[in-house]
Amino acid sequence: MTNPPETRTPRIGAWLSSTREGAGRYQAGRDRVAQILDTALEIILEGGYHALSLREVARRCGVRMGAVTYYYKGRADLLQDVLNMVLVPYADRFNEIEHVPGATAEQKLEQIIRLLLEDIQTRRTTGLFPHLWALANHDPFVAQAVDSIYILERLRLVPLIGELNPGLAPRERETLALFVAASIAGSTMFVGAGKPWAGELPLYAAIACRALIDVVKTITPEQLQAYGWRPVAEPPEWTPPTVLPDAAYRALVDGALGHAPAAAARDGVHESAPAPLATVSS
């Protein structure tokens, strides 16, 4: 499987039209928003989120400040769209994997693991996500954005885990999905772009696929209890721990599962598009 695209796809153009007020009516508006987002992402990759400012975006785009503030009132607002833009190709790739004719749940899980491992070797992922992880420790907006990204990822993993290991309870499946996602994300500092072990990805990926798929398929509630897990009664509406407010979490999940509000469907938002990331005041 090839790496997810690092450049904008036609689907992102459609997403831009439905994201920013004023961007959807004219091609010039869509082009301007795309330029702003590309520039903002490049600034983050070079210097981190602290280097991002609307003034710097305007300077690099060669436009007046008002051409940026027309669409974005602050950098948190801008970061939200940058992250949503980054997510669009992954939503498409996950959907492709989900609908591969004749593929088993194990094969789909392997493809997702390989997709995510290959992605961490892109400059974008290796450069962007460590910045976000660090900022999430003290910036509530970034913390919610990062949590949203991994919630969306787990939404693809949990059904496969349930199919491969139906004996696990919902909390156990969700936590196992968290373990798979965290194991892959934590590999960034070792096999990411420009990292010392980057050239060993084929062997590393083989080990990761073998280990992660094996634990998903074979782990049992009894084994978890033998290592200290004490099951508790789950409330009927149990949800995974999150920093998102309840309403934001539910909106994110419903959007990702295609339960978008009627207005979104009316406006032509593609059902595979990621739900907008949660926002807080910056």
Image (cartoon, rainbow, N blue to C red):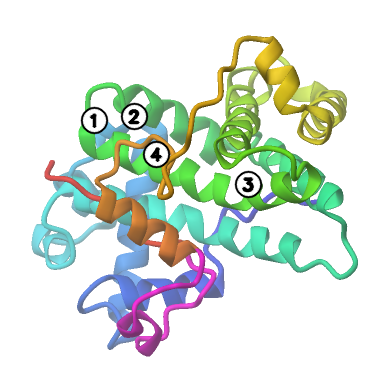
Earlier in the chain: of badge 2 and badge 4, it is 2
Is 148 or 197 nearer to us in this picture?
A: 148
Give the residue at mark 4. 147
Q: Quadrant of residue 183?
A: top right
Q: Quadrant of residue 281?
A: top left
Is 281 or 12 nearer to us in this picture?
A: 281
Circles 3 and 4 in contact, beta carbons < 8 Å: no
| Label 3 SS | helix
Task: Measure the alpha-carbon separation of dots 3 and 2.
Answer: 35 Å
Which mark, residue 47? 2
Disc 4 crowd, CA 10 A, few/some/many (<14, 14-19, 20+): many
Please state which amino acid type lies under the numbered disc 2: Gly
Task: Measure the alpha-carbon separation of dots 1 and 2.
Answer: 7 Å
Left or right: 135 with respect to 54?
right
| Label 4 SS | helix
Please state which amino acid type lies under the numbered disc 4: Asp
Circles 1 and 2 in contact, beta carbons < 8 Å: yes
Residue 273 is situated, as x and y percent measured from the top left of the image, at 49, 67
Residue visible at 18% across and 66% down?
Answer: 71
| Label 1 SS | helix
Give the residue at mark 1. 50
Disc 2 crowd, CA 10 A, few/some/many (<14, 14-19, 20+): few
Residue visible at 71% across and 44% down?
Answer: 161
Q: Is residue 266 magenta?
A: yes
Which mark, residue 158? 3
The span picked out in magenta is 257-273
**In the picture shown, does residue 132 fall above or below 150?**
above
